[in-house]
Image: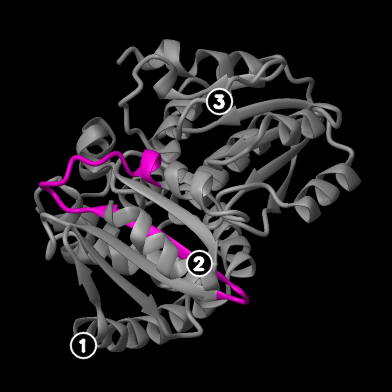
Amino acid sequence: MAWEETVKPAVEFLGKMKTGSKVAVILGHDDDTVCSAAVIYRLLKKIGMKPSLVVSGQNFTITDDAVARVRKLKPDYIVVLDIADIGIELMDKLKKIGGVLNIDHHNVKPYAGITYVNPRIADAHAYIPVSYLCYRIYAEFLDADDISWIAGIGTLGDHGVTNCLDLFKKVNERYPELIGGKELVDEKLYDGSIIGKLASVVDSARVAVGPKGSMKAVKVLIDAKSYNDVTGNKQLKNWYTQTRLEFRRIVEDFWKNKTERDDIVFYVITSKYNFKSALSGYLQQSFANKIIMIGHKDGDVLDISFRRGAKVNTDLSQLAAKVVKSIPNSTGGGHEAASAVRVPIGKVGELLKILSK
């Protein structure tokens, strides 16, 4: 893929900003969006802008309270990073506040009147995390070696290593201890390297306390002089320790209480921590022929993360769309290989019937 052309609209958008412009950076909660925000925030500061961070109340869309916070900032520009489900009406609200740059890698939307960077515009099946796109954008302005480890954390956290090998070769060249001689594939790096631990440390903030944790994580990444400032941060270390112990308990409970139906394995986490994405990703190696569905209760709604085993070709974004279409008051979206939905608690039985068809 010609990356210069893919990121060119973003480079031109940022290049036309006047020095001192106020920029609202909107992000979600996971590793990819957090690391993307850290890279873009650093870039904006270095080119003379005044960025502010706005974490949405939900990971996959921009909540009304987030829009209100953006409006209160009165920004000249808005940069949206790795948020999957932004409807046309919602984007129109943002356009009325300031010029919009949306950097994403989910299914393409028919936006108008904004600057839109998405590798799926050129290739509908492309899977390139936003952290990698932001790394490429940063490199068009400045030497990106110093932020390559941040982009690497986000890309690994979103399971995008094999499609972004040039980034990980750069990380290995600049910070060989982070890779530790491991094979450059997601599973090997996540479970057996320092950069894998960094991805878990950053994600533990989201798992432990939700949006507030994501804000803490992105601020640590922005201020970090090196990756040691992440692993050495007292608050992140505490969250990581707490969540690792709980994760082990949940894995044990999963094997006792999971539900299997045909090509689906389903489990609802009972924990104050939101491990659905981490657990579904962890289990992919154990269920090569199944779709993995991990739920977590949020009030009267069940958040469900979808992942697929290595031998499954089902498009999970289409599966999520099927659920949203079939079950009233449900929302969701994502990628071919990773998606999520939110459904009313009382509709879980109906959900399983739909997915078993």
Q: Is residue 171 left or right of residue 237?
A: left
Which residue is at 62% across, 77% downward?
Answer: 299
Magenta stretch in the rendered image: 298-319
Q: Quadrant of residue 131?
A: top left
Q: Residues within 10 Å of mark 2 (few under 14, many from 20)?
A: some
Residue 77 can be seen in this image: yes
Q: Quadrant of residue 191?
A: bottom left
- Whether 40 is among the magenta residues is no
Assign the N terminus to one quadrant of the image. top left
Q: Is residue 199 above or below residue 332?
A: below
Judged from the image, the secondary structure of the residue bearing numbered disc 2 is: helix
The residue indicated by pointer 3 is 109
Q: Residue 165, how many percent across, how many down?
A: 21, 34
Tell me how far mark 2 sits from mark 1, CA to CA.
Answer: 23 Å
User: Between 67 and 203, which is closer to the camera in this rendering?
Assistant: 67
Q: Residue 44, how many percent across, how many down?
A: 65, 34
Q: Residue 330, how many percent across, how many down?
A: 57, 55
The residue indicated by pointer 1 is 256
Q: Is residue 131 left or right of residue 183?
A: right
